[in-house]
Image (spheres, rainbow, N blue to C red):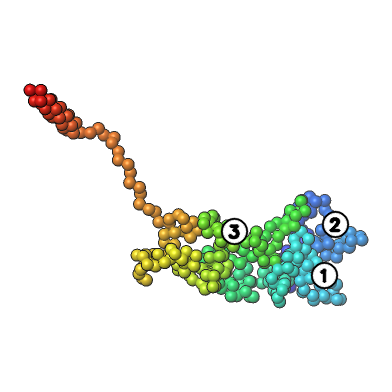
Amino acid sequence: QVGEHAESMHNIGYSNENFQEVWTDLGSSNDCLECHTTGYDKATETYYQTGVQCEACHGPGDTMNRDTSPELCGVCHTGPYPTYDEWVVGGPSHGSADCITCHNEHTSKMEFETPDETCGQCHDSHVTQVDESTHGLNDVGCVECHMNVEDADFYNGVQAKTGHSFNPTEHELDCTSCHDVILEKHDVLGEKAQACLSCHGDIHELKLELVNRKTYDNDDPVPLCAQCHNERYTDWSLGTHGAHDDSQAVCTECHDPHIPIINKISTLESIPAREFDDPAPTSYKLAFVGVLLVFAFSVWSLRRNSSD
């Protein structure tokens, strides 16, 4: 355990280069030393160990505090990096999960190799759904949506976001952060994630979902489209495209569902205008002149005969 602690962020809580740089820039405030040292005494402004050592959590050797509660971690993990404050209002705090459910208490590292494995210890059904979804197939894991992380701005007094509430707000859970899609027509369904989920249903599974909660695979969009576009569905089902069960041309083969007014399949090119760059052949010109001469001679002959 001592060896594990030696490699932890707790051990270098004071000597860490990032801490030293910011702490120095801000005037080396003693307030920081309450968490970045062990045994800090406000009255004398002294400490007896740098970093977060064993007694910072366990107390003096004769008492050996074995408390592993989140409240103990919350003594330091608050303020500029409000991990504990976010966790209290998040999902895990309402169940049996606490800090050491996910983190090793001595190394501070995750207990499992990947974040998804960690989440799967409690949320296995959701992780399975994500793994089988478009997100999972593209290596988008839990933390991509559930942990909005931003560094603290110590110079302007802005707290960090540690992502430990695990409940992304409407502002944070914005599908357009990754998906460069601008809805046309379908924007009547809502904005941002609300519009997306009105068709894609459960955010973990991402299957097409009807208003009655029945789901369909993404390659079977007809029932979903039909619940709003029922007249067009009737026309389609009676027409050539919907006539054969084995070879139906479904809605999305022609229409992009995100921009449905634009045909996904290119139409035939427009017929080009006739071009007359080259002059008409000489034979045509001579024939035209000949016709005019015959017409003129005929008129002259008629007039002559009438005068006689």
Name the mark on residue 55. Answer: 1
For label 3, count other residues whose C-alpha is less than 10 Å away and answer few (under 14), some (14-19) or many (20+).
Answer: some
Q: Examine the image and state in which quarter residue 16 appears.
A: bottom right
Label 2 secondary element? helix
In the rendered image, the vertical position of residue 302 relative to residue 275, given as above or below: above
**x then y, percent, for residue 183:** 53, 56
Q: Position of residue 175 (x, y in %)?
A: 58, 60
The amino acid at mark 3 is Glu
Answer with mark 2 or mark 1, whichever residue precedes in sequence. Answer: 2
Q: Secondary structure at mark 1?
A: helix
* Foreground: disc 1 or disc 3: 3
> Which residue occupies 64% across, 65% down?
146
- The answer to whether residue 233 is above or below residue 297 is below
Residue at 58%, 60% in the rendered image: 190
> Residue 303 has which mark?
none
**Distance from the alpha carbon under mark 2 to that under mark 1:** 20 Å
Q: Is residue 273 visible?
A: yes
In this picture, residue 187 sits left or right of residue 171: left
**Which one is in front, 152 or 4?**
152
Q: Residue at x 51, y 72 (%)?
A: 215
